[in-house]
Image (cartoon, rainbow, N blue to C red):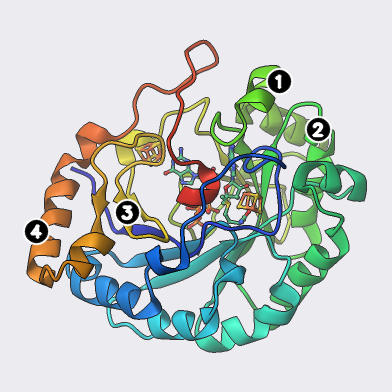
């Protein structure tokens, strides 16, 4: 069994963007009611009494858009100060980062992954449904100035939408310590867009980049499945997250906790989930919760998604989508 020590926590299922590959305008998402969300106190108790004792050491905060979570800074402060948390990070769309970069850094967050799918304002608007490129860019610069390191930029590559920009996006890694990651588009969030054009594989992207700039293997701190390369002499690196063309499930090291307390062993398989919030609110003690999570850890290898669409298979339909699970 793999060591599973990475917990991705979705802090909120709402988002201020409507990315076409994730939560397209008009998509019918059933939002979690406020009273169904784990409170900061419940979340901290679960980490302290259940997850950390079971060996989870790496925490990523995501969403929806995590910067929309009320009391975010105090939550980050509390998690950063928990004994046993060795790595705390966040994935965000960056819209509120200009205001929040400094307070989050002061609270103890040290690394951050920011979505930036395009350098072209029109394409950015087409993808995110928002005319907010400048504000996101300001957020990225603010995070860089404050000292987030590594600072990663996540690009979901959508054929005929932003794939023309691969070289320009890759070039962001040359002069600054920015780590640009290209993510293969997964069939979860917007089946229509996926069916229409499908995905671009990382090997093709690497070839394009290598032909233009050269490419060598690189190194960057992270807990995720990215393969790391580097343009020779660049300050930053390039990561490729190839969940469609490669299968990295055999060394999967993570579980996911939703904003309403569902613990999910695999992004792409809904089996085996445990409703930790309900168990907690029913008054189960932490020892019982630890046993439930430990049992799920034992089952994880069986649940891990193995039947991925390599470009020929059937699509699956999911009860929860990316913005609810947290990516
Ligand atoms: N299929 C699959 N995709 C994943 C998994 N983890 C990350 N991804 C993909 O990679 C995207 C970006 O992940 P991030 O939120 O930046 O986190 P990460 O890559 O684990 O972060 P680092 O710790 O910095 O390496 C996700 O939205 C997914 O599309 C995984 O376990 N399975
Ligand atoms: C669900 S978002 C949540 C965090 C934050 N709102 C953001 O966009 O960074 C987390 C990650 O999921 C990625 N993502 C969303 N839908 C995807 C899809 N269909 N295929 C691949 N990645 C996807 C996003 O690009 C982002 O990097
Ligand atoms: S990818 Fe992130 S920013 Fe875009 S809609 Fe999904 S949750 Fe929101
Ligand atoms: S698809 Fe599931 S098992 Fe595979 S790497 Fe992602 S979370 Fe892990």
Tell me which numbered mark, 2 or 4, is placed earlier along the sequence: 2
Q: Which residue is mark 3?
A: 262
The residue that label 2 is drawn on is 161
Residue at which label 1 appears: 197
Q: Position of residue 79 (x, y in %)?
A: 39, 79
Mark 1 or mark 4: whose residue is earlier in sequence: 1
Which numbered marker is on residue 284? none
Badge count: 4
Q: Nearer the viewer, mark 2 or mark 4?
A: 4
| Label 4 residue SS | helix
Between the C-alphas of marks 3 and 4, the distance is: 16 Å
Label 1 vs 3, first from the N-terminus: 1
CA separation in Å, label 2 and label 3? 34 Å
Q: CA distance from mark 1 to mark 4?
A: 44 Å
Mark 4 near ligand 4 (CB under 8 Å)? no
On the image, the x and y values in percent for residue 251 come to: 32, 40
- Looking at marks 2 and 3 on the same chain, the residue that comes earlier in the sequence is marked by 2
> Of helix, strand and loop, which one carries label 1?
helix
């Amino acid at each position: 069994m793999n060591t599973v020590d990475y917990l991705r926590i979705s802090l909120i299922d709402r988002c201020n963007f409507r990315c076409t590959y994730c939560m397209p305008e008009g998509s019918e998402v059933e939002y979690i009611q406020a009273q169904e969300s784990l409170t900061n106190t419940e979340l901290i108790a679960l980490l302290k009494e259940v997850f950390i004792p079971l060996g989870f050491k790496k925490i990523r905060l995501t969403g929806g858009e995590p910067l929309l979570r009320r009391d975010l800074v105090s939550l980050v402060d509390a998690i950063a100060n928990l004994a046993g948390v060795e790595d705390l990070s966040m994935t965000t769309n960056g819209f509120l980062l200009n205001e929040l970069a400094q307070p989050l850094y002061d609270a103890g967050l040290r690394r951050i992954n920011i979505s930036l799918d395009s350098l072209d304002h029109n394409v950015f608007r087409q993808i995110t449904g928002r005319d907010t490129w400048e504000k996101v860019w300001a957020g990225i610069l603010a995070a860089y100035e404050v000292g987030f390191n590594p600072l990663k930029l996540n690009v979901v590559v959508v054929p005929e939408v932003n794939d023309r920009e691969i070289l320009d996006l890759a070039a962001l890694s040359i002069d600054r310590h920015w780590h640009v990651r290209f993510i293969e588009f997964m069939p979860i969030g917007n089946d229509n867009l996926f069916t229409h054009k499908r995905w671009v594989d990382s090997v093709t992207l690497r070839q394009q980049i290598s032909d233009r700039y050269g490419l060598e293997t690189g190194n960057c701190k992270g807990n995720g499945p990215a393969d790391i390369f580097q343009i020779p002499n660049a300050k930053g690196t390039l990561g490729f997250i190839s969940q469609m063309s490669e299968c990295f499930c055999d060394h999967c090291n993570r579980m996911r906790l939703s904003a309403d307390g569902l613990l999910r062993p695999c992004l792409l398989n809904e089996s085996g989930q445990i409703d930790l919030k309900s168990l907690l609110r029913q008054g189960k003690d932490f020892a019982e919760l630890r046993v439930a999570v430990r049992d799920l850890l034992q089952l994880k290898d069986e649940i891990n998604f193995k039947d991925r669409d390599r470009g020929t298979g059937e699509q699956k339909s999911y009860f929860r989508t990316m913005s609810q699970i947290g990516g």
